[in-house]
Amino acid sequence: MFAFINARIYDYNRYLESGFIVFNQSIIEVGCMSEYVNRGYQELDLTGKLVLPGFVCGHTHLYSTFARGISLRFNPNNFLDILHQMWWKIDHFLDLDAVFYSAVMGGMNQLKLGTTTLIDHHASGKILGSLEMVKKAINDVLKMRGIFAFETSDRFNLIDCINENLDFINKNHNRFSSGLFGMHASLSLSDESLKEISNALNSNGIHIHVAESEMDETECEKRYGMRVVERLEKFNLINSKSLLVHCTHITEHEMEIIKKHDATIAVNVTSNLNNAVGISQIKKFLDKGIRVISGNDGLMQSMPNELMYIYYLSHLKTKSPTGFSLDDLLKIIKNNYDYVSTLLGVSLGQFDLGFEADFVISNYHPYTRMDESNAFSHIFFGVYPGFQPEEVYIGGKKLIENYKFIENFEDFYTSSNKKSEELWSIIKKEGEKLEFTD
C-alpha cells in the first residue's frame, strides 16, 4: 500500500492543510498528519502539493479526434449543415483501426489534463465491434475509466446499431467500463426507429443529443407535432439512467418531464458557443432539482476549463454576476462523480474509505490563506486556469509523473498520424459524393 503524506487535500467536500491518504486501488484511510502512523506503507511526500479527485467528462466524442487540422469545404447556414459538411463525413469513413487510434489520442489529450473517467458518444461507418475498439483504447491502453455508447441513427443500419449497444452493455459492467444506449438526436431518428429502440431498450439508459440547436425542436414539432423531450417520453425512452445532452432549447415543460423521470442533463457550453447554438439554462435546471453534469462534446479537452466556462457563461445567461454561484458549480462537479459512480458500480470523487484511488496532483502554492472556508475559491480561481496535473493516478496506479506519461506512447503518435492521413485522403476523395437524408 501507498501513502501520500504532508499534502494539501481537497475533494470538494473537505479540505486538509496537511494530510495523508493511504491507498491501494481504493482509499484505506484519510486524515491529518498529526494522526498519521506508518504501518509499512510506501510513502510519497507531497509537501507543498495539492491532491484533487480525477476529473469526469460527462459527454465527449473521441471519434472526432482526427478532425484536428483537417480542411473541408465548410460554409454552414445552420446546425444541420455543420453535421452534413463536417461531422457526418468524418465518422462515415472511420474504420475500426481509425476508431481505435482516434480514441487513444483523444483519451490521451484528456488524461494529461486530468480527466480520469469519461462518457463517450461514438459514431463510425463501421458499427459492429466499434465500441470494443474504443474500450480497448481507453481501458486497456490508457487505463482510464469509460462509459460507452454508439450513436444510433437512421443514417446507419438500425439493427446493427441496436445490437452494438446492447451487446456492449450486456458484456461490460465493472469498475472501469460500462455502457449506455446511444442515440444521435431526434432529428435523425424516425418514429419507427424509436419504437424499435424502445422495444429493445430493456430499462437501459439512453445517451442522446437533445435540443442542441433550435432545429432539433422545430423539426420535431413540424414532423411529429410535439417537442423533443415529449417525443422521447412518448416512446418510454427516459429513465433515471438516461443522459440527455445539451438541452439548450428545452421548455420548462420539458424540464419537468426530465425531472419526473430523474434523468440527467449533460451541458457542453464551449461546444455550444463554437456552434453558435446558444447557452443552456443551467441555473434553472439546477433550481428545478434536475441532475446536471458537465461534458466537453469532444471540443475542449480540459474539464477545469469547461467548468470555468459554465460559471462565467451562466452569469451571462442569467444577466447577473451573482446569478450562478460557486456552490451551483460544486453541485455539477459532485453530480459528475455521482452519475458515473452509479453506472460503473464504484465510488468516485471523495477521499473516504472505499472510494477509488483516482487522483490528480497539482503543484499549487497559494499566496493567500487557504482553508476549509475558501478552498473551492482557490481551486476555481487559482488551480483551474491553465491546469495541468503533475501526477495522475487511476485505481491507485500512477499514469503520469512530472507531467509526462509513464508509458511510452510514441508509437501511437506515429500510427495515428498515418491513420489520420489515410482518413483525410478518403474524405476529400469520397466525401462530396455522400448524400444524407434528414
Image: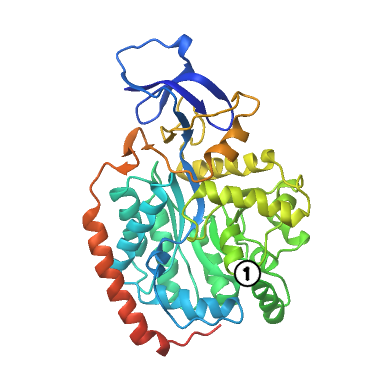
How far across and down, in percent of the image, does residue 242 sit? 57, 55
How far across and down, in percent of the image, does residue 342 sit? 52, 42
The reply, left or right, for residue 122 in relation to residue 385 is left
Can see residue 88?
yes
Q: Residues within 10 Å of mark 1 (few under 14, many from 20)?
A: few
Q: Amino acid at mark 1?
A: Ala
Q: Observer-nearest residue: 185 or 62?
A: 62
Q: Residue at 64% across / 29% down in the picture?
A: 374
405 over 318 or under it: above or below: above
Could you tell me which quadrant the N terminus lies in?
top left
Q: Residue at 39% across / 24% down in the picture?
A: 46
Could you tell me which quadrant the C terminus lies in?
bottom right
Q: Secondary structure at mark 1?
A: loop
Q: Residue at 77% across / 54% down in the picture?
A: 318
Q: Quadrant of residue 251?
A: bottom right
Please tell me how many numbered marks the rendered image carries. Answer: 1
Can see residue 262?
no
Q: Which residue is mark 1?
A: 276
Q: Quadrant of residue 72?
A: bottom left
Q: Residue at 63% across / 39% down in the picture?
A: 330
Seen as rendered, the residue at the extreme bottom is 433
